Amino acid sequence: MNTAADSKHVSIVNAKKSDQAETKTIYSVQNFNLWYGNNQALYDVQMDIPANKVTAIIGPSGCGKSTFIKALNRMVELVPSVRMNGSIYYDGKDIFRPKYKVEDLRTRVGMVFQNPNPFPKSIYENVVYGPKTHGIKNKKVLNEIAKKSLKGAALWDEVKDRLQENAFGLSGGQQQRLCIARCLAIEPDVILMDEPTSALDPISTSKIEELVQTLKKDYSIAIVTHNMQQAARISDKTAFFLNGEVVEYNITDKLFSYPDDKRTEDYITGRFG
Ligand SMILES: Nc1ncnc2c1ncn2[C@@H]1O[C@H](COP(=O)(O)OP(=O)(O)OP(=O)(O)O)[C@@H](O)[C@H]1O
């Protein structure tokens, strides 16, 4: 006789099959290795990141989560000692190919960091900064971009009457949503988030979590998080990193309910980390 757990397992496996059948891959990472000087931080990473889903990256401190997502927009190359091999395909194109324009990648892939980092400018100027840098000068167009991006980041209602005030006057949670609005203003396809809620209070955290759920209709999201409950709540797929390797990558329900690897089970049940 099938138990309730068996039925749940079957439905997770079926969900996984249909997930694989229907979802477009936005990033395909193949045999990717990365070193800082002589220290290897990523080992043979293989991962297809689905479009219009939330992919969580979890694992203990120092396991390579940030390094991995910073490789996805080639930001990691800003560290002079970095060496890499293997491939990362974004939308079918190898981002490390010599002719690949990193500027194109940066306009299609936005990033939100752990600590909100608005510029010392007005709320309005923060949002329109990217479009202005890309040459948009028309005030009406910029106003529309500002409104649309702030609405997209669920911040418009809170700031619409104070757009010219300095962004530092906002709360930490509002500043983080402003950084998301700034990222939306360049109309990216992908949003990379590196522990975006770790500096926020629980209410601001839940606002960002709700926002991530809304944003995935229009954007592909990869989020690094230390918070396993958060990964379980908001992501469709989860990758568990350990010592620079992807130990397990699966649909989130499956990974948290029936992990394939003992190390994943030990981590998600709090035996280490
Ligand atoms: N700029 C750097 N120069 C040298 N080594 C680095 C650099 N950044 C990270 N590392 C090393 O690479 C490894 C992976 O670090 P990374 O920051 O990617 O891990 P993480 O999983 O994001 O950690 P945390 O959860 O603590 O943020 C670590 O051993 C770290 O010391």
Image (spheres, rainbow, N blue to C red):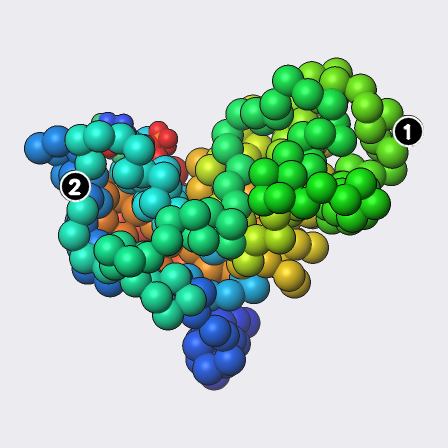
Dividing the picture into quarters, in which one does residue 132 lie?
top right
| 69, above or below 188, in the image | above
Residue 57 placement, left or right of 182:
left
Residue kind at label 2, given as amino acid type: Arg
Secondary element under disc 1, as helix, strand or loop, is: loop
- Residue occupying image coordinates x 74% and y 23%: 122
Residue 117 image offset from top left, x and y in percent = 57, 25
Q: In the image, ligand 1 is in what quadrant? A: top left
Q: Residues within 10 Å of mark 2 (few under 14, many from 20)?
A: some
Q: Position of residue 204 (x, y in %)?
A: 69, 31
**Amino acid type at mark 1:** Asp
**Toward the viewer: 111 or 194?**
111
* The quadrant where residue 142 appears: top right
Residue pointed to by mark 1:
161
Tell which residue pokes out farthest to the right in this image: 161
Q: Position of residue 48 (x, y in %)?
A: 36, 65
- Mark-to-mark CA distance, 2 and 1: 48 Å
Q: Residue at x 71, y 29 (%)?
A: 125
Seen in the image, is 166 located left or right of residue 53?
right
Q: Is residue 114 above or below residue 150?
A: above
